[in-house]
Image (cartoon, helix red, strand yellow):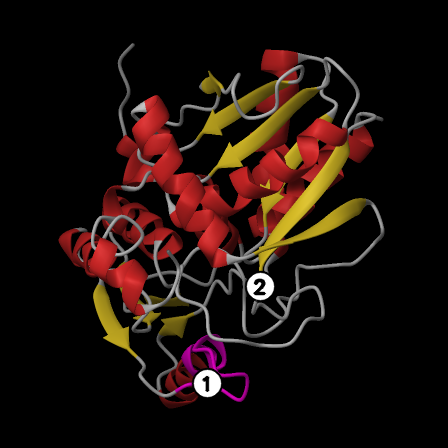
Amino acid sequence: MIFEKGSELILDDVFLTLPDLAPGREVLLKIECMNPAGSIKMKTALALIEDVEAAGALGPGKRVIESSSGNLGIALAAVCTERGYDLTIVTDPNATSDAVAMMRAFGADVRTVTATDANGGYLGSRLEYIRAALAADPALVWPNQYANPANARAHERTTAPAILKELGHLDALFVGVGTAGTLRGCLDHLRAMNARTRVFAVDTVGSVTFGGEARPRFVPGIGSSRRPELFEDTGEFDKVLVHERDAVRECRLMARRHGLLVGGSTGSVLAAARRLCGGLAEGARCVVISPDSGAKYLKSVFSDPWVAERHLG
């Protein structure tokens, strides 16, 4: 198969069976790391840029600016360089050095904020930086992944339909919550298809999205120090909190048992599935969405000193 653009290389039908995670249930890991830029966020980045293009916001002299601690920044950098747009990514110290290097490899200008926000995280500080930059420079265009419905539409049109097309009947879906775009998009499609699928929204302890108390968090890609606008507590899903310690353990189990490196957010969702799939009906078909690989986390989640220093072992 021949493609004309790197962004066209979306692989939405790759699943790995996990027979040891919940005996008696069919658990499938939906692999997203084979997409361009290495994650599920390639679909989000494409949707965001196409949205601002359709609005006529991009053109000569314009520069895209966005907040990201990892995958969205990498994917957005790839899309912007492919389409000829300049890009500034605002990140923070929790972004891995490999993620920042990948953003820069695609040509992005990366700015790092170091001051924490009122909840002890960095998201509020990153957004404050962006708002100040927008006020000072009218050439900047902010897609705003946290509030832009295009984020959710990307998964309503790709991720969820791909799951149903490949598997047909689906009893349970486990989705990590960061911006909540994947969660909302999948819910919208499942609702439209009248699918009787139980959805588990997975967040990390220390995130405020579900209304919990803000605490220090170290694993990027899941959780937030500020509730994203796309998150709506509609009652259509079960909310599950996972400790980062359990996420790290699941990442390492995947590496040692299945020969597959998965990212920290995947570890969180796997921990939730391990805890809850056994309570589903015998033979239940469950899908766990794995947003990215663990290649960017070798110096963090897979590093013994890093884990010990943060008491996540």
Q: Amino acid at mark 2?
A: Val
Q: Amino acid at mark 1?
A: Glu
User: Which quadrant of the rendered structure holds the C terminus?
Assistant: bottom left
Q: Is residue 307 left or right of residue 106?
A: right
Q: Which residue is mark 2?
A: 205
Q: Which residues are magenta?
A: 116-127
306 vs 202, nearest the viewer: 306
Q: Is residue 228 left or right of residue 236?
A: left
Q: Is residue 186 left or right of residue 109?
A: right
Residue at 39%, 53% in the rendered image: 72
User: Which quadrant of the rendered structure holds the N terminus?
Assistant: top left
Q: Position of residue 227 (x, y in %)?
A: 63, 70
Q: Residues within 10 Å of mark 1 (few under 14, many from 20)?
A: some
Q: Which residue is mark 1?
A: 128
Q: Is residue 157 left or right of residue 301?
A: right
Q: Position of residue 60 (x, y in %)?
A: 29, 63
Pointer 1 or 2: first along the chain: 1
Which quadrant holds residue 3? Answer: top left
Is 291 in the magenta? no
Q: Is residue 45 visible in this depiction of the protein? A: no
Q: Residues within 10 Å of mark 2 (few under 14, many from 20)?
A: many
Q: Position of residue 276 (x, y in %)?
A: 69, 36
Residue at 69%, 12% in the rendered image: 168
Is 121 in the magenta? yes
